Image (cartoon, helix red, strand yellow):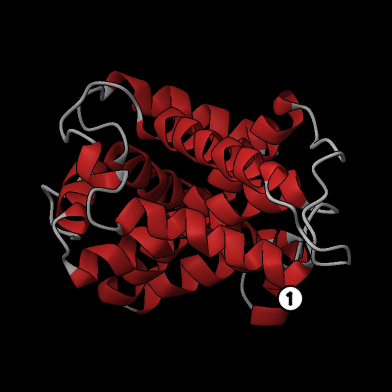
Amino acid sequence: MHGPESTCWTLVEHAAAGDGAAREEFGRRYLPVVRAYLHARWSGRLAAEELEDAVQDVFVAFLREQGVLENLRPGRQEAFRPLLYAVVRNMALRIEHARARRLDRPGSESFRAEEKPSSEEALSRVFDRAWAASIMREALDLQEDLARSQGEDATRRFELLRLLFDQELSIPKIAERWGVDAELLHKEAARAKREFKEALRSVVAFHHPEAPELVERECRELLTLLG
């Protein structure tokens, strides 16, 4: 599923058809986003283990026969992110309504329907931030893979970027640690940032196969959202 013609819709198509690798990739890409939204929605309303069971139930609904994935039409024009949000929200509402009707036994494991979830606007922000974090992680993974395939210099640029942003070290501090000229590192850092943006564009384009004009805009929005 990582070929040049791979898109979110080909992934959906293969996962819906029962392809094990596609289903694993679908889970890797999207389960953390689904989990973040449902944890925010149901925290305080379900016990921790029951909440995680509900997260898995929602995810299984995507993959089972006659489930959500089989009802999606690959190649559609809209972006995948709002569709995923709508599906997860609607399934969460169905679960809430079903549990509210059920006479749960008293106790900490009962579903507390009277405790309202956060506002939908707040939950939407949780989803968007989880989506952005997932896309950024994938872009970093892609950049690292490309760097390792390109040799020592590219790998060192990726490590420089990691030190700058993960460890928040300054260019002079890294230059001192590596025993190199700080001005050279400034140039290498600029190149590493360009390489990251290219990786980010590639990941975002995976979700906008029919609308390449949206890729640059979403890249800017993602960087702003996590800024």
Q: Position of residue 181 (x, y in %)?
A: 63, 67
Q: Quadrant of the C terminus?
A: top right
Q: Is residue 195 visible?
A: yes
Query: SS of the residue at dot 1?
Result: helix
Q: Which residue is mark 1?
A: 176
74 or 222, nearer to the observer: 74
Label 1 neighbourhood size at 10 Å, few (<14), some (14-19), many (20+)? few
Q: Position of residue 94 (x, y in %)?
A: 55, 38
Q: Is residue 143 visible?
A: no
- Residue at 31% from the left image edge and 22% from the top image edge: 78
- Residue at 52% from the left image edge and 53% from the top image edge: 134
- Residue at 21% from the left image edge and 32% from the top image edge: 209
Labels in figure, total: 1
Up the image or down, 161 lies above or below 217; here it is: below
4 or 156, nearer to the observer: 4
Q: Position of residue 211 (x, y in %)?
A: 25, 22
In screen coordinates, is 120 left or right of 6?
right
Q: Quadrant of the N terminus?
A: bottom left
> At label 1, which amino acid type do we have?
Glu
Q: Position of residue 149 (x, y in %)?
A: 26, 74
Location of residue 21 by image quarter: bottom left
Location of residue 127 by image quarter: top right
Residue extending furthest front?
A: 103
In screen coordinates, is 71 left or right of 131?
left
In screen coordinates, is 107 left or right of 193?
right
35 or 167, nearer to the observer: 35
